[in-house]
Image (tube, grey):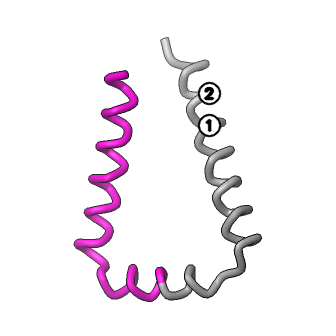
Amino acid sequence: MSELLTAVALAIALEGIIYALLPGTMRRLIGQVLQMPDAILRMAGLTAAVAAVTAIAVIRYFSV
């Protein structure tokens, strides 16, 4: 459970850093995302989730 909470906190910290460093870019990106069709957003979300789970599996497999 500790690892999960640490991972969530890290994700929030990284997102905060991006918003702090690039607020205009993030505002434009959000505007573009709002205009995307649902099917594209679903596919992007699914792709990101599969990539993350795969990365976790590979890291855990090769770590000691």
Q: State the separation of the CA atoms marked 2 and 1.
A: 6 Å
Q: Which residue in the rendered view is the most extreme toward the left? A: 20
Query: In the picture shown, does residue 41 fall above or below 15?
Result: below
Q: Is residue 10 magenta?
A: yes
Amino acid of disc 1: Val
Tell me if 18 is positioned left or right of 54 in this view.
Answer: left
Q: Which residues are magenta?
A: 1-30
Q: Amino acid at mark 2?
A: Ala
Q: Which residue is mark 1?
A: 53
Q: Quadrant of residue 2?
A: top left
Quadrant housing the N terminus: top left
Q: Residue 59, percent across and down?
A: 55, 27
The image quarter containing residue 9 is top left
Q: Residue at x 27, y 62 (%)?
A: 16
Count of numbered badges drawn on the protein = 2
Q: Secondary structure at mark 1?
A: helix
In this rendering, the answer to whether 39 lies above or below 51 is: below
Query: Pointer 2 and pointer 1: residues touching (CB < 8 Å)?
Result: yes
Q: Residue at x 39, y 85 (%)?
A: 27
Residue 54, relative to residue 45: is it above or below?
Answer: above
The residue at 70%/63% (across/down) is 42
Q: Which mark is residue 57?
A: 2
